[in-house]
Image (cartoon, rainbow, N blue to C red):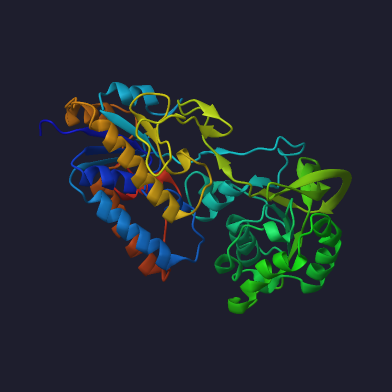
Amino acid sequence: MENQFSVAVIGAGPAGLFGARELANNKARVTLFNRDIKAGGLAEYGIYLEKHTMKEGLRRQFRQALDLPNIVYYGNVTVGAGGDFTLDQIRALGFDAALVAAGAQGTKSLGLPGEELEGVYHAKDVVYHYNKLPPFSRRKFRFGKKCAIIGAGNVMVDIARFLINHCGAEEVTAVVRRGPAEVNFTKEEMKHLISYLDMDEFESEMKRAQPALEAIKQDPQIGRNKIMEAFAKADPKTQNATFRFDFLASPVGMIGGNGSLAKLEVEENILTERDGKTSAKGTGVKRTLDVDTVIFAIGDQVDANFGLPVEWGEFVKNKEPKFPVEGNSYESPIEGVFVGGWSRKASEGLVGYARKDGINAAKAVLQYLQTKSPANIRAEAVEECVDALPKRAVRKEDLKRLEAIEAREAKKRGLEEFKFSSNEEMLQAMGLIETA
């Protein structure tokens, strides 16, 4: 079809899929490149294990987007330095624009001593592991009886639940650099964990934090209420385990022997307030916690090797955008290349946010396209480049076949859900590579 704009969308999580749908519904031809075999991104591989209804509802929406005839899907294709294509190679194919919605694939590191010890992990790796995203699905983790999670958001809650319910953890401690009023989880998530809270420990922790709260004239009841409101709909306790908070503490290093973690060292903090914002400030007082697992749930950052300029863990956005949407810039410094979802703002919000941001990014792309004439690239030329790769790309019809096979396998095994745990198994199931 002549005079049709062609857009490359990189990443098929919620931002990429809903962005692609917005573009396709406005008559653009969209080519979706996705690192993973399956579409869905964090909606497929980042949601807690037992949330089957939520996952299935999202998958239904993703299937509807992929069913649009002017969306072409290539899964199992990585874009970035060292990938199957670089961003420059994708642009050189002649697309009228590119929308990068590849999420935040980099991990935040605090650069602390002992980060390399066995038993020290990043939250994203753990979440990918229990959601069976290759290759994390096959990675060996050492989850011990005494675990510390750095952070106080919904991801912390998910990981604490996983450690208690699936890994046999007996003590899980959330290490929180600020006070109880600054916890960042929702009561809807915390209700799954709150039954494990050691109330005696919590009361003594609140008492310990009180002088720091009083110093900035913060009512301790604010933080208490924020945590306690989850009790109203609390899940029953099913394991012999305890959960606790360690407020006003920042990790400063991990200590171990023979390559394995044994202790977490933290520095005690006080609180400061400026312009209505509460911050933590170290006191120099340090202490250690006996732990065999430490998991950092402190957010993510973009992949610095992707091919776009990076600043402060985010892709650089044009500060004076020509095509703003709702006051936000979706434009990278490279003309015709846009960013959306976590690629625009890492670790911001949940699926609903990524969906909206992907749609808004697509609207920015559509504004840009109105200033151009279509290049009318040949879809066959793109397909030839993909087919020339030394591995098999996955198409939409392959995904449908895989979905049906996994559904049958789940039914046969009496499971809510079944997932193959390696790319090779998925490719074999779809008939794209021969069985070894």
Image quadrant where one finds the N terminus: top left
Report whether residue 40 is seen: no
Left or right, residue 50 beside residue 214: left
Quarter holding the C terminus is top left
Residue 149 seen in this snapshot: yes
User: Foreground residue, 230 or 112?
Assistant: 230
Q: Farthest left residue?
A: 1
Residue at the image position 70 percent from the left and 63 percent from the top: 169
- What residue appears at the point 60 percent right and 49 percent down from the top-left corner? 123
Q: Is residue 31 above or below residue 69?
A: above
Nearer to me, 219 or 260: 219
Query: In the displayed structure, does residue 315 sit left or right of residue 242?
Result: left
From the top left corner, tell me how far across and down residue 250 is, in percent.
Answer: 77, 47
Name the spot of residue 205 as percent of width and height, x first: 82, 64
Q: Residue furthest front?
A: 275
Residue 300: x and y, percent?
57, 42
From the viewer's perspective, tell me whether residue 337 is left or right of residue 163: left
Q: Nearer the viewer, residue 228 or 65?
A: 228
* Figure quadrant of residue 113: top right
Residue at 76% x, 64% y: name it: 219
Instruction: From the top left corner, tell me how far across and down residue 222 is, in percent.
Output: 70, 66
**Residue 91 versus residue 410 in the image, above or below:** above
- Report whether 50 appears left or right of 206: left
